[in-house]
Image (cartoon, helix red, strand yellow):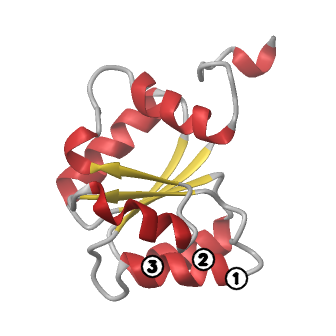
Amino acid sequence: MRILVIEDSRFLRSAIERTLVKAHCDVIAIGDGREGLRHAQDDHPDVILLDMMLPNLDGTAVLRVLKEDPRTKVIPVIVLSGLPQKNESRLKSAGAAAYIEKSRLNLSGDGNDLMKFIHDLLGELSPVSADSSQS
């Protein structure tokens, strides 16, 4: 699975990237909204993890452009935010597939919690493993 992470915090971006790589994902990790949007349009990831507070183009603008662009409108976007969940309905109505408060993001271990969340979101039933596509 190819996942684009657009997060300006170098520490969190690196932690998410390590977690997803452990879960056998191909990860592109970007710290800037404009650059993240370009990667989404060029690379067509399977899922985007999108922070709201970004330099050069904020997450709300990135989400809006992604959902207006025929090349990217079908890519599920999971919003990562440090803000309370009261913003969840507004973001979902803008096109976000899901919302995760950063304080609830579990990046420990092998990444199974985050991958389960992503797979549940995508409607897949089996956990990610290196051998799952070979059975």
Residue 1 percent location from the top left of the image? 64, 41
**What count of labels does the image hold?**
3
Q: Residue at point 37% right, 34% down? A: 19
Amino acid type for the residue under numbered disc 1: Asp
Q: Which residue is mark 3?
A: 35
Residue 103 percent location from the top left of the image? 19, 44
Residue 66 percent location from the top left of the image? 60, 77
The quadrant of the picture occupied by the C terminus is top right
Amino acid type for the residue under numbered disc 2: Leu
Q: Residue at point 29% right, 61% down? A: 86
Q: CA distance from mark 1 to mark 3?
A: 16 Å
Q: Secondary structure at mark 3?
A: helix
Looking at the image, the residue that sits furthest to the right is 135
In the figure, 31 relative to 125: above or below? below
Badge 3: residue crowd in 10 Å (few <14, some 14–19, many ≥20): some
Mark with earlier residue (3, 2):
3
Where residue 124 sits, quadrant-wise, is: top right
Q: Which residue is mark 1?
A: 69
In the figure, 27 relative to 76: above or below? above
Q: In the displayed structure, does residue 97 sit left or right of residue 87?
A: right
Q: Residue at point 59% right, 40% down? A: 121
Q: Secondary structure at mark 2?
A: helix
Q: Nearer the viewer, mark 3 or mark 2?
A: 2
Tell me whether circle 2 and circle 1 mark residues in contact (CB < 8 Å): yes
Mark with earlier residue (1, 3):
3
Amino acid type for the residue under numbered disc 3: Glu
Q: Which residue is mark 2?
A: 66
Where residue 8 sits, quadrant-wise, is: bottom left
Badge 1: residue crowd in 10 Å (few <14, some 14–19, many ≥20): few
